[in-house]
Image (cartoon, rainbow, N blue to C red):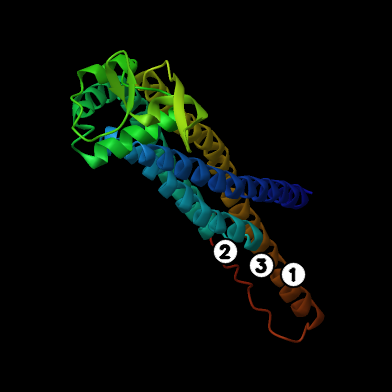
Amino acid sequence: MAQNNLEVGMKCIKYMLLCVTAIFVLTSALIISVGTTIYAIYYDVSFFLYDQMFSPATFIIVIGVIMLFVSLFGCVGALKESTCLVNIFAVILSLVLVLEIAAAIAAYTLRGQVTKMLDENLRDTLPYYYTNSEVASSYDFIQSRLNCCGVDSYLDWGEVQNAQGTEGISVANITVPFSCCAQTRRHILGEMEVEECEKLYANGCLPRITYLVYQSAGLLGAGAMTIAFIQIIGIVFSFSLATSIRKAKSERERRRWEIQERMINAYTSLSPDTEKKPVVYVPFHGQTVA
């Protein structure tokens, strides 16, 4: 009866671990997707970010790839009832759990530095718009994609010295780039079709890009903590399954020795003329001798 209960309990834990492993595969793919998406967002505005802002996103991608491969240990170990593989699975999960907590802490720490970093970088690079092509392409990208103009508003372009021969939109003696245009209108001038800007983006880029990077960092931290919670469940199931497998194997070994002992005793009882020899019982691995 105890043997049957042990077998049933081990099967329940085994199938639970297989379910958790399947969830790990799905969450690994999800966290890799989130990490690559956040990395792509950071890359688009990388000119205004410090290099360490990419660390949590890269860390999350690496963790997702590791979890994807580690899930194989749990799946194979559960199917083959291998104590070694299940223990390896649990230990690696514990190490990855520590890495995920570190990634979440790093993401939330860098989150608090976003506003100051972006404010400094946007204001420092704005005066070089007409002299540096990288600055120009970076500003044009965020202004057109985030629907913004300047740092705080389009008035910031009044402090930028316009180079001779450059084109732009003239508003109240201020020349702003074409990427600040929110709405255009086409009309015929002579034999030519001219596109004229009717409306500029009213909002500055600082609050828009700050919100984007701030929320992305928060998403990374939340994703890491969510996966960490699932991993804790997987670690508990893994160690429980390893213990159950060890107990079941010990019980099977004990019963095997009992059957052998009964067979020897039965053989000696059927052969009375044969000299009876004492039966030596060899304890199996894991059993203590009384």
Name the one closer to the observer, 195 or 267.
Answer: 195
**Element carrying mark 1:** helix
Which mark sits nearer the N-terminus, 2 or 1? 1
- x, y (%) of residue 146? 44, 28
Q: Residue 268: percent from the left, percent from the top?
A: 74, 79
Question: Do the residues bearing badges 2 and 3 touch, measured as CB atoms within 8 Å?
Answer: yes
Please give the residue where the numbered disc 2 appears in the rendered image: 284
In which quarter of the view is residue 129 placed? top left
Three-letter code for the amino acid on which mark 2 is drawn: Phe
Determine the residue positioned at 39% across, 40% down.
57
Closer-to-camera residue (94/202)? 202
Q: Quadrant of residue 180?
A: top left
Q: Tell me if mark 1 has few (under 14), some (14-19) or many (20+) residues whose alpha carbon lies within 10 angstroms of its own.
A: few
- Three-letter amino acid code at the position of disc 3: Trp
Q: Are marks 1 and 3 in contact (CB under 8 Å)?
A: no
Task: Write down the residue under mark 1.
Answer: 262
Give the SS element for disc 3: helix
Label 3: few (<14), some or many (≥20) within 10 Å?
some
Q: Earlier in the sequence, mark 1 or mark 3?
A: 3
Q: Position of residue 17 (x, y in %)?
A: 64, 48
Vertical position of residue 13 compared to residue 281: above or below: above
Q: Which is nearer the eye, 126 or 166?
A: 166
Residue 257: give its label: 3
Q: Vertical placement of 74 versus 282: above or below?
A: above
